[in-house]
Image (tube, rainbow, N blue to C red):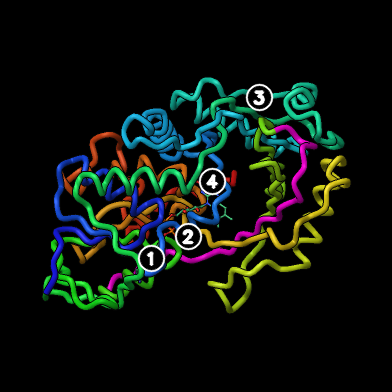
Amino acid sequence: MRSAAVAVIGAGVMGASVAWHLAARGRRDVVVLDRAGTPGMGSTGRATGGFRAQYGTPINVRLSLLARDRLLRFREETGVDPGYVPAGYLWLATTPAELAALGAARAIQQAEGLREAVEVSPAEIAELNPAVRLDGVVGGAFCPSDGFIRPLAIIEGYLAAAARSGARVECGVEVTGMRRERDGRITAVETSRGPLAVGAVVNAAGPWAAGVAAMAGVALPVTPLRRQVAVTAPSDLLPAGMPMTIWVGDGFHLRVRDGRVLLLWPTPGVPGRPFEASVDPAWMDAVAAMAHARVPGLRRVPIDRDACAAGLYEMSPDKHAILGAAPRCPNQYLINGSSGHGVMHAPALGQLLAEIMCDGRASSLEVSGLDPGRFERGAANPVPELL
Ligand SMILES: Cc1cc2nc3c(=O)[nH]c(=O)nc-3n(C[C@H](O)[C@H](O)[C@H](O)COP(=O)(O)OP(=O)(O)OC[C@H]3O[C@@H](n4cnc5c(N)ncnc54)[C@H](O)[C@@H]3O)c2cc1C
């Protein structure tokens, strides 16, 4: 039987980050398996590439600040530019309650060291994004060090650097089952290319992570949630450096990427079909109407219906990542449930999981709030009000 010290299941941004961090720690014999033909074909390839530290809980702010440090060193460490552009995230409130929620989150952000996050008045919003119609906007929040990253470049950098340190990446290999000892430890993974004896498994299977965990009898509370993205025809109507602009009330947001405008508006998934990832034509019409009302200039730019796409968020019950050894399966390490923040947090989470696997505990951050056992202990995090 073939063997590996560590089998990482999933060549998305999480699997790539863990593989590199393990390799950088000197772990040899790491293999990354993905059923798709190339890395990044899951959620990571659908991500729009936002990066922010403006969160509403201390652990999420800390993860972003650690990730930002790592992104600033990414090219030096991997040889690839992660595309970090600090264009800012601009949040718009249309009620005093929304403005208060932004203020409460900002107090947490400031306490964690994100001093550049500030409140902005309608006049300041007009300067930061002159394209936005300000009717009903009572104020907002802005952080200039938030911005954009390139999801596929991050995968490419991590996997290439991991391979140079001896990791193997095997695409077109599906994990179909797991063999276990009586004590719950995994001894081998069954794959479409035959069994692989393993010392440990990293479950980095994104929205499909619950199914992978279940192969070893682990009940992992990660569920898929469809996110649709409308894309305009190429246009220079809005500047490339425009901040990500988000309405707090309904989560509608837009950004410019590669000369097109991306429009997003979160909606529930398709009832009874949790893995459905097609784009609903009625949704495209609705999001275009929202865009026209809020950014009137966009009325002149058509939606490119063929370029619109959808993907799956990997939701956890408290919208926070799940990180560490699985309950009652001590050599299945979980790096799941980032709930739509996974690309930006992957540089931090991969480092932290490598610390847990190599040293028995994370040292870069206190991560008890991400512990996989928190749900059954009734110790979930408060669900953040912001996206
Ligand atoms: C529309 C959209 C926009 C987003 N925007 C952002 C954003 O702006 N910023 C941000 O940080 N995040 C964003 N996200 C979230 C982000 O994409 C995810 O949090 C992140 O990509 C999760 O990475 P992952 O590696 O865990 O999962 P994935 O990228 O899905 O990787 C999991 C991999 O596991 C493989 N796999 C699954 N099961 C098996 C199996 N049995 N055997 C072998 N391989 C298997 C899959 O093929 C897949 O490649 C967005 C997501 C969507 C859908």
Q: Earlier in the sequence, mark 1 or mark 2?
A: 1
Please give left or right for residue 295 compared with residue 77 in the image: right
Work out whether mark 2 precedes mark 3 in sequence or the reverse, and give the earlier one: 3
Q: CA distance from mark 1 to mark 3?
A: 38 Å
Q: Is any atom of residue 58 visible in this view?
A: no
Q: Is residue 281 left or right of residue 106?
A: right
For the question of whether residue 261 can be seen, the reply is: yes
Q: Amino acid at mark 2?
A: Glu
- What residue is shown with label 2? 314
Q: Residue at x 50, y 29 (%)?
A: 109
Q: Kindly report the distance in space between the C-alpha atoms of the residues bearing marks 1 and 4.
A: 23 Å
- Label 3 beta carbon within 8 A of ligand 1: no
> Where are the magenta residues, as a range?
217-239
Please state which amino acid type lies under the numbered disc 4: Pro
Residue 384, numbered label: 4
> How far, Cα to Cα, is label 2 from label 3?
30 Å
- Name the amino acid type tagged 1: Ala
Assess disc 3: are there few (<14), some (14-19) or many (≥20) residues with their C-alpha within 10 Å of its C-alpha. Answer: some
Do the residues bearing badges 1 and 2 touch, measured as CB atoms within 8 Å?
A: yes
